[in-house]
């Protein structure tokens, strides 16, 4: 079929929908639209057989839905109506929720039903972004497959909604999200998680107006609600009416600032305003790095908020990898969290008084981490991707000997859209796996890649099923099998020989030097618009047209690697 995807942003769900439909032979156009005029123009220019809106914040104008079958993927169960479905579901502690595919009409979210899915809400209040990227996205993808099948069935007729049932929910505003720090911990937790990752909940900490995100229950800390009882790294512990909450991320509210402020680790956002407080123990859900050993397998777990890795994150993870590599294990697993990694921490860079200098520190720190991974010849290294990865996060994973990904994960192995040439030894690890021509295509076309496609082209070595809950066990089984008997010894011997041959052909440091030479122009001369692209990404502002003055970064031609 000829299908048009109308989206407010090319987010994870939009990318999955585009890849899913193309893989099934449909001719798919995708348009990012901001208003009814752009929606109408996109439909007229494409003249599709079917329009699907997986993530659209604007109403489809009548001129479009009357002419073209237009299906809205609404993140709520049948009968739920309104633009803030997930926010209300989390705040109201709904036990079940769903996703509905309905036809656009003049009745907002009231059109005929093409399909629906229902799922149980997690017992622990979920972050809105987590709920959207897991249960909601899985249900939406199932529905999109159903919609396209029904659209090709001439006998199918969508079912009308019963207008007497259902709930019409208004747009959630800050007044609806508001809380007092004297309220019960659970009440505050739900409100913050219902606004994570955007827009956060407005409040005040240490006398500073902020929007807060990334909340986790903490141990009771006697004292005045709203005061800060402790900190750990860059998270802060805030007293509540009956306990305390850890706040991992915050954004200063500065209406008179010349440009929008960005979300940061909470202690950095409050820099200069934090009182002297003791170090406290964070709960497991907020622990960013950990190490455990299971037999001959060493397991380094890291989970950074939204996969962003600051200079400090990279240095701490580098130390953890060195510690793990010094143990007498046969296999070292690098297991990422909900998002494996997206590379540089753009927020910390953007908020720094000297963004270019901080970007340079960040890129050299992540390069140091990648060097430890590539140079670990005493153990087999396995990257375990339970969640998506982008830019330098993909290249970090590729430094391992084996890459295991959960089926359904998305990879974005490119830097160009952020105005960067890229580093993390990508000119070594990427062509080493896929060849130079494929490496050029991946880094210049800037398309997302599914885990299944990544396995076909060699980016991923093994798919471990789509079930999130079972992924870690599947990786551990695979790593244990690698470590068993003399298998690991054979693979390690081959690994050392390959690394030595590559080093003789061309020292690894030269790849880094070449990449950083290019990156210095992008960071300090801003030749590809890194500063603007970075801030637009962080604030949701329009990024503007792609900078045309320079060709896309291409892989330098080198002697082939084994």
Image: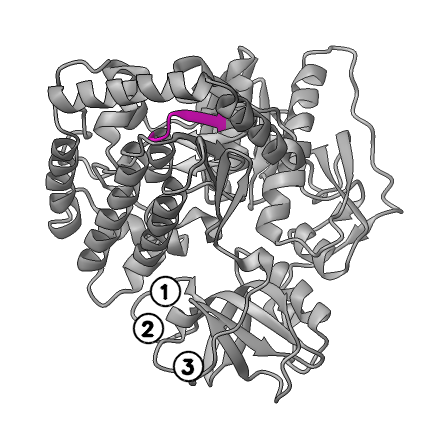
Which residues, given as a range, are shown in magenta?
399-404
Q: How many angstroms separate mark 1 from mark 2 (CA)? A: 7 Å
Other residues around mark 3 within 10 Å, as few (<14) / some (14–19) / many (≥20): some
Vertical placement of 130 versus 421: above or below?
below
Disc 3: which residue: 274
- Residue 402 is covered by the magenta coloring: yes
Disc 1: which residue: 260
Disc 2: which residue: 257
**Element under disc 3:** loop
Q: Residue at x 37, y 66 (%)?
A: 261
- Residue 499 lies, in percent from the top left, at 24, 23
- Residue 231 is covered by the magenta coloring: no
> What is the quadrant of residue 448 in the picture?
top left
Can the viewer see residue 538? yes
Can the viewer see residue 17? no
Can you tell which of label 3 and label 2 is closer to the viewer? 3
- In the image shown, does 43 or 237 lie closer to the viewer? 237
Other residues around mark 1 within 10 Å, as few (<14) / some (14–19) / many (≥20): some
- Residue 36 lies, in percent from the top left, at 51, 42
Can you tell which of label 3 and label 1 is closer to the viewer? 3
Q: Residue at x 48, y 80 (%)?
A: 278
- In the image shown, does 537 or 383 lie closer to the viewer? 383
Which comes sooner in the sequence, label 3 or label 2?
2
> What is the quadrant of residue 87 in the picture?
bottom right
Q: How many angstroms separate mark 3 from mark 2 (CA)? A: 21 Å
Q: Are marks 1 and 2 in contact (CB under 8 Å)?
A: yes
């Amino acid at each position: 079929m000829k299908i048009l995807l109308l989206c407010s942003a090319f987010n994870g769900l939009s990318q999955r929908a585009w890849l899913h439909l193309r893989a099934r032979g449909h001719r798919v156009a995708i348009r990012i639209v901001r208003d009814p005029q752009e929606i109408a123009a996109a439909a007229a220019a494409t003249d599709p057989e079917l329009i699907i809106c997986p993530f659209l914040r604007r109403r489809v104008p009548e001129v479009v839905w009357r002419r073209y079958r237009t299906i809205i993927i609404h993140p709520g169960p049948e009968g739920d109506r309104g633009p803030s479905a997930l926010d209300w579901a989390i705040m109201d502690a709904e036990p079940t929720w769903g996703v509905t595919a309905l036809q656009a009409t003049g009745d907002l979210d009231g059109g005929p039903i093409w399909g629906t899915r229902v799922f149980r809400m997690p017992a622990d209040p979920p972050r809105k972004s987590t709920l959207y990227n897991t249960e909601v996205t899985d249900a939406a993808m199932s529905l999109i497959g159903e919609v396209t099948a029904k659209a090709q069935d001439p006998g199918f007729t969508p079912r009308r909604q019963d207008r007497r049932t259902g709930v019409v929910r208004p747009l959630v505003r800050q007044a609806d999200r508001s809380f007092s720090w004297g309220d019960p911990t659970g009440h505050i937790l739900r409100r913050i998680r219902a606004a994570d990752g955007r827009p956060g909940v407005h409040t005040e900490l240490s006398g500073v107006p902020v929007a807060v995100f990334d909340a986790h229950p903490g141990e009771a800390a006697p004292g005045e609600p709203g005061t800060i009882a402790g900190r750990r790294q860059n998270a802060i512990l805030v007293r509540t009416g009956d306990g305390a909450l850890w706040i991992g991320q915050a954004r200063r509210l500065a209406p008179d600032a010349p440009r929008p402020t960005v979300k940061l680790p909470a202690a950095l956002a409050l820099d200069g305003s934090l009182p002297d407080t003791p170090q406290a123990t964070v709960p497991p859900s907020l622990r960013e790095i950990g190490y455990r050993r299971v037999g001959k397998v060493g397991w380094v777990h890291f989970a950074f908020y939204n996969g962003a890795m600051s200079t400090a994150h990279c240095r701490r993870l580098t130390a953890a990898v060195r510690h793990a590599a010094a143990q007498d294990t046969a296999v070292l697993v690098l297991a990422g969290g909900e998002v494996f990694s997206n590379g540089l921490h753009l927020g910390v860079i953007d908020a720094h008084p000297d963004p270019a200098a901080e970007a340079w520190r960040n890129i050299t720190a992540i390069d140091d981490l990648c060097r430890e991974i590539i140079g670990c010849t005493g153990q087999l290294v396995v990257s375990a991707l339970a969640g998506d990865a982008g830019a330098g996060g993909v290249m970090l994973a590729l430094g391992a000997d084996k890459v295991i990904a959960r089926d359904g994960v998305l990879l974005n192995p490119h830097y160009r859209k952020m105005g960067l040439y890229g580093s993390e030894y990508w000119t070594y690890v990427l062509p080493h796996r896929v060849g130079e021509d494929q490496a050029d295509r991946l880094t210049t076309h800037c398309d997302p890649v599914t885990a299944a496609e990544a396995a076909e082209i060699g980016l991923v070595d093994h798919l471990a099923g789509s079930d999130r809950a079972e992924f870690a066990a599947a990786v551990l089984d695979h790593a244990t099998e690698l470590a068993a008997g003399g298998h690991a010894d054979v693979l390690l011997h081959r690994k050392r020989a390959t690394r030595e041959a590559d080093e003789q052909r061309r020292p690894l440091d030269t790849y880094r030097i070449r990449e950083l030479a290019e990156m210095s122009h992008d960071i300090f001369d801003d030749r590809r618009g890194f500063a603007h692209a970075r801030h637009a990404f962080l604030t949701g502002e329009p990024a503007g047209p792609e900078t045309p003055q320079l060709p896309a970064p291409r892989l330098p031609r080198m002697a082939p690697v084994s």
